[in-house]
Amino acid sequence: MKTVICFCLIVGLWACSAQQISRPDITRQSGLASSNHITIAYERFGLPKNETILLIAGTNSQLTAWPVSFCEQLARGGYQVIRFDNRDTGLSTKFTQASRPDWAAIGQAIQAKKPIPLLYTLDDMADDAAGLLDYLHIDKAHIVGASMGGMIAQRVAYRYPNRVLSLVSIMAGGGKSDFPLLAKPAVMASIPPPALPADTTAYIQREIKVFRTLGGQAYRADSVQIRRQVEADVQRSFYPDGYERQGAASMAGFYAGRAQELQTIRVPTLVIHGSDDPLVIPDAGRNVAASIPNAQFELIDGMGHLIAEPWLDKLVALILTNTARSH
């Protein structure tokens, strides 16, 4: 049970970028979209006339999880790039009238292999992404997701095959349900339990520890920059309840084992994983790639469970190579 809760309260996409300042050569616009009966906050980079790359973030990750420099590099490749806040986080709709997940009931459902009680699922969040494309009058897009966002991206490709040009799933499972819940339990156990919801100071300290742990052993982060990023995210939005509900949806997706659905995906697909991911075992990514016809698998040496400066150029190059396969 403790492992289940640890997974749910940690899993996500975490970013640390040394460059969060937009450059004048790339246009940038923000807005609020009506999607799937909720409001989605988004930002777009580049020209709307170009093909779109839609970026889907992980658990408890705001759109800022995709660094500005990363988005701009993709836009310079000739694309419009859109990043957005998933439901229950950032500036998107928060389900303030809903309760937190019942972790005891969730644990019992997992052990009994019964449906997990959820307020919403990754399928709902995939519908949010498709609804955002509808709102922006975008017929088709290249879908890129990381961690929980990778599983959502898989759902988008399955549920909306005619809307997806290509798929990139980064550091995400979802193909088979019998992998270990944590890749490196001893490493992840070094992260302290979540702070009380009102204690933002303790929350920030814990998030800094999360950054360092998820980055992997080769990650050498700038402490000042990590703190600055975490504090900026907290100032933009601080909503622990949404964090837990997303975690529950993510865990249910991890356990779902949707290999048969993945086998129906026919677009150019790339699955990326870090060799030093302490959260999601690389074999889970390999299994996703093996489940999707003609999918390619790329293991990045030394990368953990983090979208961060040491690997941004590599990730951009891989994504652009995969999008080109659709042409």
Image: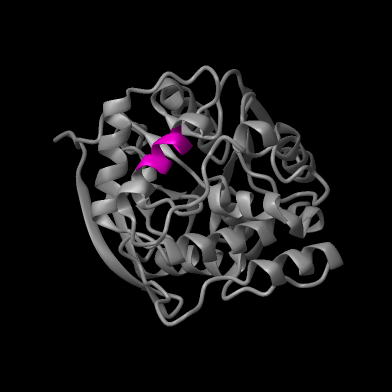
- Work out whether 278 lies above or below 49: above
- Work out whether 75 lies above or below 11: above
Residue in view at x 32 percent, y 42 percent: 230
> In the depicted view, which residue is nearer to us: 194 or 239?
194
Magenta span: 205-211
Residue in view at x 48 percent, y 52 percent: 194
Residue in view at x 37 percent, y 52 percent: 62
Q: How many marks?
A: 0
| Drawn side of residue 236 relative to residue 65, left or right | left
Name the colouring of the figure. one colour
Q: Residue 42 location, x and y as percent?
A: 32, 58
Q: Is residue 48 visible?
A: no
Residue in view at x 58 percent, y 70 percent: 101
Q: Is residue 22 shown in magenta? A: no
| Drawn side of residue 294 relative to residue 170, left or right | right
> In the depicted view, which residue is nearer to us: 108 or 249?
108
Quadrant assignment, res 78: top left
